[in-house]
Image (spheres, grey):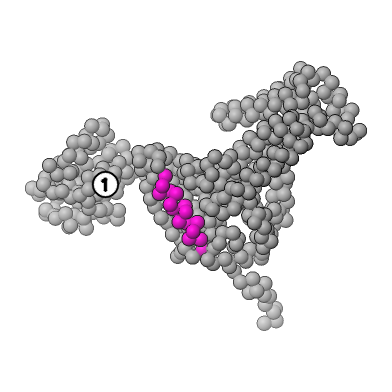
Amino acid sequence: MNAAPRLWQELQESADFVCYEQDMNGIPLFVGYMKTITDTDILQRHIMSCLTGGEALTIEQLYRKIPIAEKERSDDWEHIRDKLHRGYVAIQYGQDSPHCLLINAASSKGRSVAIPEVEFTVEGPKQALVESLDVNLNLIRQQVPHPGLRIKEMTVGSISKSRVAVVYIEGIVNEAYLNTCMQRLQDVQFDQITDSTLLQQMIEDNSNSIFPQTIGTERPDYVAWVVSSGQICVLKDGSPTAIFAPVTLWLFFITYEDYYLPWIVASLLRMIRMCSVLFSVYATPLYVAVITYHGQGISNVFLPTIVSSRINVPFPPVVEVLIMELVIELLREAGARLPSKIGQTIGIVGGIVLGTAAVEAALTSNFLLIIVALSALASFTTPIFRMSATIRILRFPFIAAAQIWGLLGIFICTLGLVAHLLRLTSLGMPYLVPVYPFRTADLYDTVIRPPYSKFHHRFSFFRSPNPVRFDRKKASAKKDIDE
């Protein structure tokens, strides 16, 4: 028995598989498709209309007659089955023919392009990636109409058979980074890939680190910026998030809206974010260390306030801090898991009620309540969610070290953190560059966002074969107004 009839019998066990015989002037054609993922309008208007009426056609003539671009011939039943599960229509020409004609009639159901929900900005385009890979690639093509833009597709996942696209600009991307990314995607051994965030964890250099080594975005304009800078973007069909690498630690505190704002304003906002991260990590550990071991270092101005706020608190500072930190985390998780309107209410009302009740019940001090609240607010300033979650976790080992060794413990934890960051890489690129290895020329777009006249070169740590964006001398030349 040839391959196609055996395939029909196997797939008929699924209720949504349709298989029937169509007569074309005495020639039997066997048509099969999955009705749940096939567009019936395309099937009836463009495919079945070519099979009915008129004279008998050969398979070559039928192939040329069907007015659909995505079609092919195959006698590999594994390939035929895979295409059927992707919305293709299979047509077997005659009972004894081993070949099938495969025509793409997949239904394109899904949400339309909308405004970004996670990375919403006041300035700039209001388009976000969606769950359709073809739509996302279309949005990127519109942003990067460059002849060097390359899109490499592959299939990942033994069960999901997920389409994954790697996007880069040839001549700008570094081949070593590209080959590393492609190799890691090809080496992924997992059955079900439901979202690009799974790939994000599988292709990172150190999967045991709490620090993310790739960045996800839902903005096509951000994708256009990173590929033009020499980075590599990975998209998955069914996921609205594009991930890109290699990245540095400093890129996690940059929002793409910075490039739409005046450079002085954007630079101030960046510095606020980075200072907020330091405050979020060190505020509560410093409170524990100072109150427990270094009370003599407290200024006489603040000492009466701190003493009066803690006079009725029965717990040591570390227990007081852990209670408040856990309350904040509970409120944050409750607000994130509940529906949006209820979550906002829980976050606001719960924070006010629990904070007031904790102070009145002498479970915590007013001074600590302010510190914990400011620390929580500071962690929200990080624009990348995965890095924000990392900062939330970092506080707890610092608090433990502050309780055991005081300021020395905070110093030891800081050394351990720096040592870990020094060892991290992203697709083989150092995570702390341009601070380590130190590169003066690449510091211009880290802490501050300089004017665009300074963007004449791409970052050297991306190792782009074409590092020059534009000729600095020509751009700065001024024409004589008398000419």
In the picture of the structure, the residue carrying the numbered disc 1 is 79
Place of residue 125 in the rendered image (x, y in percent of width and height, measured from the top left)? 56, 52
Residue 311 visible in the snapshot: yes
How many marks are shown on the rendered structure? 1
Amino acid type at circle 1 is: His
Q: Which quarter of the picture shows residue 325?
A: top right
**Is residue 183 found inside the magenta-colored segment of the image?**
yes
Left or right side of 45 for 289: right
Q: Is residue 130 or residue 153 the one in the foreground? A: 153
Report helix, strand or loop for mark 1. helix
Place of residue 462 in the rendered image (x, y in percent of width and height, measured from the top left)? 56, 59
181 shown above or below 9: below
Q: Main secondary structure of the magenta part?
A: helix
The residue shown at (11%, 54%) is 55
Instruction: Identify the residue at the far right of this view.
Output: 300
Place of residue 206 in the rendered image (x, y in percent of width and height, measured from the top left)? 54, 44
The residue shown at (67%, 38%) is 379
Residue 89 visible in the snapshot: no
Tell me where the magenta segment starts and ends, as one range: 172-188
Q: Is residue 46 or residue 437 the one in the foreground? A: 437
Place of residue 230 in the rendered image (x, y in percent of width and height, measured from the top left)? 53, 59
The residue shown at (52%, 66%) is 465
**Is residue 304 found inside the magenta-colored segment of the image?**
no
Q: Quadrant of the C terminus?
A: bottom right
Q: Quadrant of the N terminus?
A: top left
Q: Is residue 274 or residue 289 the one in the foreground? A: 289
Instruction: Identify the residue at the far left of this view.
Output: 26
